Image (tube, rainbow, N blue to C red):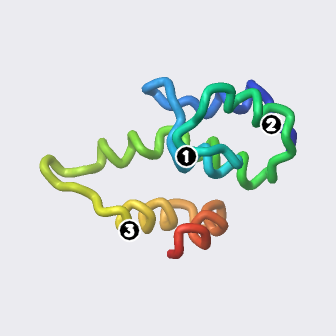
Amino acid sequence: MIMTNNIILKGISYYGGWSKHQLEAIGGQWPPKQGWKINIIGKEVDEKKVELFLYLKNYHIKNVKKRKKGKKWNKNERKILMYKEDNELNEDYARKVGI
């Protein structure tokens, strides 16, 4: 699938940005450097990775809302939750982060 500005705009979170995991899913770098969208627009990206990019749209915000007051998530707990929510879609991601 060819990345378009439309796809990138659909992935913006409620707070007006993108997460590290979203950008990594489509081959971007973290932190994003000036001109990152221009570098990604027009590139061929696997359809599953685009789905993952869109799926992760507000993932970091959802986790914050699910937390109990005062409880901190450790990184592995966050990765496991992400993997459990959609096992098939996140299979590549799970391999990447070592779950």
Name the residue carrying label 1.
56
86 in relation to 41, above or below: below
Q: Within 10 Å of the Cα at label 3, are there few (<14), some (14-19), or many (20+) other Cα atoms?
A: few
Name the residue carrying label 2.
3
Give percent across and percent down for residue 40: 76, 36
Tell me which residue sits at (46%, 27%) in the image: 14
Q: CA distance from mark 3 to mark 2?
A: 30 Å
Label whose residue precedes the other's in the sequence (2 or 1): 2
| Secondary-structure class at tag 3 | helix
Q: Is residue 85 left or right of residue 34?
A: left
Determine which quarter of the picture holds residue 30: top right
Badge 3 vs badge 2, beta-carbon distance below 8 Å:
no
Q: CA distance from mark 2 to mark 1?
A: 16 Å
Query: Any mark on residue 76, and which?
Result: 3
Give percent across and percent down for residue 88: 65, 66
| Secondary-structure class at tag 2 | loop
Badge 2 vs badge 1, beta-carbon distance below 8 Å:
no
| Secondary-structure class at tag 1 | loop
Query: Any mark on residue 70, and which?
Result: none
Label whose residue precedes the other's in the sequence (3 or 2): 2
Mark 2: amino acid = Met
Badge 1 vs badge 3, beta-carbon distance below 8 Å:
no
Give percent across and percent down for residue 24: 62, 50
| Disc nearest the viewer among 2 and 1 | 2
Label whose residue precedes the other's in the sequence (1 or 3): 1
